[in-house]
Amino acid sequence: MTLKTRIGTPMSDTKRLLMRGRDTLTEVVGKLTFSESLFMIVTGHEPTKAEAKVFDACLVILMDHGITPTALVARLVEDSIPDDIQVPIAAGILMIGNKFAGTMAGAGRLLAEGVKQTNQHAWAAATVASYNTSHRRIPGFGHPYYFPEDPRASRLFEIAAEAGVQGPYVMLIKTLGAEIDRAVGKHVTLNVTGAMAALLCEIGFPSPVLRGVTVVSRAGGLIAHILEEKETHASTEVMKLVDEYIAYEDPT
């Protein structure tokens, strides 16, 4: 059996350098931006101007949010392994998951299911009831600091509206939000990852790899944190706080 790929030509093929059927040197490099190239290599087609604007905004919005767990881990690893930048970057992005920054994956799966339903209001009600019964949080909703709205989500929707990107996924995430509010009796914030899930699905980015957008985005921010850590050695101060505030308790 011959394995095949449609993504790019192998290093051994020195006569061609293709990316998704395009000449990399003449049709991609210098022609497409990084975000446009990323969209193209994943989806197989170049984004429209509207899609590119939304995709670029999604890539930027989660690049950094201060000393988050991802940044802190990257800084601590940088202090231990200062000569190999890929190691602290990898350590930091491994923190992206169902709790920190990566919940658009779960939200995307919900939206991919819900958009197929004939009665989406009934689907939203059933989904909320199911999550409530099992005491699970619906991905993409709720935030410990932003209330009543997440300004990052609002800004993404503004950019999408300006670009003319509005459709069934945006409507569905808002329908789901309204049903959550009705079920719990108060407003629950639609956070940035929920907005990202809706908009990335709207522009045709494959839902199984939505979290990859955050991984790429946050990796860029971690480079800045790693450089700052080299200059300030802030993680040593963190470890001093550990010594000060976490006391040893003799188990005997």
Image (cartoon, grey):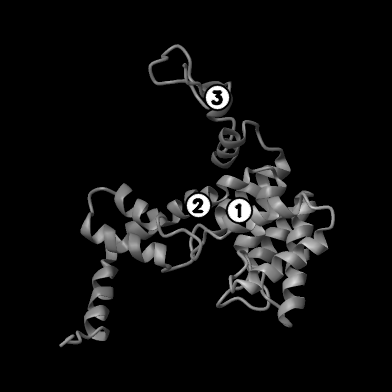
Label 2 vs label 1: CA separation? Answer: 8 Å
Dot 3: element: loop
Quickly name the residue at label 2. Answer: 217
3 and 2 marks in contact (CB < 8 Å): no
Between residue 27 and residue 246, name the one nearer to us.
246
Residue pictured at 24% horizontal, 61% vertical: 79
> Residue at (46%, 58%) from the top-left corner?
96
Q: Which residue lies under the disc numbered 1?
A: 58
Q: Nearer the viewer, residue 174 or 29?
A: 174
Give yes or no for contact between labels 2 and 1 (Cβ–Cβ under 8 Å). yes
Amino acid type of the residue that numbered disc 2 sits on in the rendered structure: Ser
Look at the picture and state if 188 lies above or below 69.
Answer: below
Q: Residue furthest right?
A: 119
> Residue 85: x percent and y percent?
30, 49
Inspect this view and state whether residue 22 appears.
Answer: yes
Direction from residue 232 to residue 192 in the image, left or right: right
Label 3: which residue? 6
Q: Is residue 166 visible?
A: no
What amino acid is labelled 3 in the image? Arg
- Report crowding for label 2: few under 14, some 14 to 19, many 20 or more residues within 10 A (C-alpha): many
Between marks 3 and 2, how big is the CA–CA gap? Answer: 25 Å
